Each structure stands twice: as structure tokens, then as C-alpha cells.
């Protein structure tokens, strides 16, 4: 039998933490619960979890601060934020601190499980993806979240790396914007669409050294990576 996937859950509401733990463990996950940010950071260092589920509002250390500290040494372990906040600025802040996804409370356990699986599936890349893939004269390393041109290497954010990987998988073909949004953001609403546009703009600027590599719009339908 394969080892169970280790999940670190940082949630200060005991009843919600218990429900999440029970729901995930019936799907063969192994969940460790921590009630505040400081305990969760110590637990992260001890448990080496494969995915993190962090409540934003916690005592001692909030979820954003916790994620920021973890990202100083770990750029790859997926992070899902649980938040009662609904402002777009709060969601953007979560991504800036290294989050891969977020769920607004209240949420269904099935939705959480789907998002956990989606993030874990993105880590299952072919070997050549882990070593680095050629995009024109660039070398894109998804695992390290870096983009190298000759000897010059630039770091990507988590979201930039995810967007670029999805465009690369369908390179020279149009990627439906709504499909991309649902895979990475979980929905295709206006605010998610604006966030995607921002990340596309940032990627375009980072790909300007090779004039044969372009990300183009396709008449409002989606995006195409030409390389």
C-alpha cells in the first residue's frame, strides 16, 4: 500500500479542524492539526508535510505570515488558505505570500478535497519537467520555479510558474481562459480573470529576451504560448 499523503492543517476552530481531518482521513490522507501559527511552523519542520492547509486568521502567527516564513526555505509544498475574508486584495495578498489556492468559508469538504488533489496532481510532472524544459532560448524549471536565459536566472512566483506550465503543456495552441482559471483559481469570475491578466503581463515581461517566444491573446478566447 502506498504511503498516506501527509497534510498539515493549521486551524484554530476545533470543530472545523475535526471535520476537515475526518473528511481527509476517510480519503486516505494523514492529517496533523495545529491550533496556532507558531505550533504549525514547528509541526511543519517536524512532519515534512506534502501539502499545507492554513487558516488565515490564527493566534500568535497568522496564515499569511506563516506561509511567508515557510516560503523562505520551501518554494514547492502546496499551500491552501482558508479564509473568511472576501476582498480581492486579501486573496491577492495570499498569493503574494506563496499560496497556491484559497477557499472562502464556509466551504464544502468535497470542494476542499478536489482542490487538494488538484494541487498534488500538478506536482506529478515528467522527469524532464523537473530537470528543466526548453522554451525557446529559455530553460524553465517548474520545480525550482525559475526561468533561465543563458547564465541569467530569474525566480518566478508560484502562480507565474503554474500559468507558464499550463501554457507550455498546450504550446502553440490556444488555452481557453475559463479552463485555465478553473484549474488554477477554482472559478472563472471577474476578479480571478483580472488576476490572471496580471500574471500573463508579468510573464510576458520575463520572456522578452527571446523574440521568438510570445504569449498572445486569441480574440478574448484565451492565450497561446508561441515557442
Image (cartoon, grey):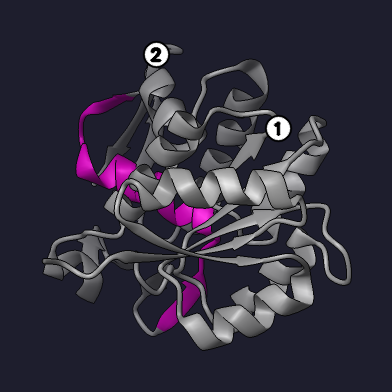
The residue carrying pointer 2 sits among few (fewer than 14), some (14 to 19) or many (20 or more) residues within 10 Å by Cα, namely few
Which mark's residue is nearer the viewer, 2 or 1? 1
The x and y percentages for residue 39 are 72, 78
Q: Is residue 227 left or right of residue 112?
A: left
The x and y percentages for residue 87 are 82, 31
Q: Which residue is mark 2?
A: 221
Seen at 21% across and 37% down, the residue is 170
Seen at 82% across and 62% down, the residue is 62
Vertical order, 172 against 133 (above or below): above
The x and y percentages for residue 151 are 38, 85
The image quadrant of residue 114 is top left
The residue carrying pointer 1 sits among few (fewer than 14), some (14 to 19) or many (20 or more) residues within 10 Å by Cα, namely few
The x and y percentages for residue 107 are 61, 29
**As rendered, which of 205 and 187 lies closer to the eye?**
187
Q: Secondary structure at mark 1?
A: loop
The magenta stretch spans residue 165? yes
Q: Which residue is mark 1?
A: 105
Can see residue 101?
no
Range covered by the magenta-colored residues: 152-175
The magenta stretch spans residue 159? yes
Seen at 23% across and 71% down, the residue is 130
Q: Secondary structure at mark 2?
A: loop
Q: Marks 2/1: CA distance? A: 31 Å
Seen at 45% across and 43% down, the residue is 23
Q: Is residue 67 left or right of residue 196?
A: right
Vertical order, 157 against 84 (above or below): below
Amino acid at each position: 500500500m502506498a504511503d498516506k499523503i501527509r497534510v498539515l492543517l493549521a486551524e484554530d476552530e476545533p470543530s472545523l479542524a475535526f471535520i476537515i481531518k475526518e473528511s481527509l482521513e476517510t480519503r486516505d490522507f494523514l492529517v496533523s492539526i495545529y491550533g496556532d501559527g507558531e505550533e504549525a511552523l514547528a509541526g511543519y519542520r517536524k512532519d515534512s508535510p506534502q501539502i499545507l492547509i492554513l487558516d488565515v486568521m490564527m493566534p500568535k502567527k497568522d496564515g499569511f505570515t506563516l506561509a511567508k516564513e515557510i516560503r523562505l526555505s520551501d518554494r514547492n509544498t502546496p499551500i491552501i488558505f482558508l479564509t473568511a475574508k472576501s476582498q480581492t486584495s486579501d486573496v491577492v495578498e495570499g498569493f503574494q505570500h506563496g499560496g497556491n489556492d484559497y477557499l472562502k468559508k464556509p466551504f464544502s469538504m468535497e470542494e476542499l478535497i478536489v482542490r487538494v488533489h488538484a494541487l498534488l496532481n500538478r506536482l506529478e510532472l515528467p522527469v524532464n519537467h523537473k530537470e528543466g524544459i526548453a522554451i525557446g532560448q529559455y530553460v524553465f524549471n517548474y520545480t525550482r520555479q525559475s526561468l533561465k536565459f543563458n547564465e541569467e536566472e530569474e525566480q518566478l512566483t508560484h502562480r507565474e510558474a503554474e500559468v507558464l506550465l499550463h501554457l507550455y503543456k498546450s504550446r502553440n495552441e490556444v488555452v481557453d481562459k475559463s479552463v485555465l482559471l478553473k484549474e488554477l483559481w477554482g472559478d472563472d469570475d471577474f476578479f480571478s480573470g483580472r488576476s490572471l491578466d496580471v500574471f500573463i503581463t508579468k510573464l510576458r515581461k520575463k520572456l522578452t529576451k527571446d523574440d521568438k517566444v510570445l504569449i498572445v491573446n486569441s480574440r478574448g478566447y484565451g492565450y497561446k504560448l508561441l515557442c
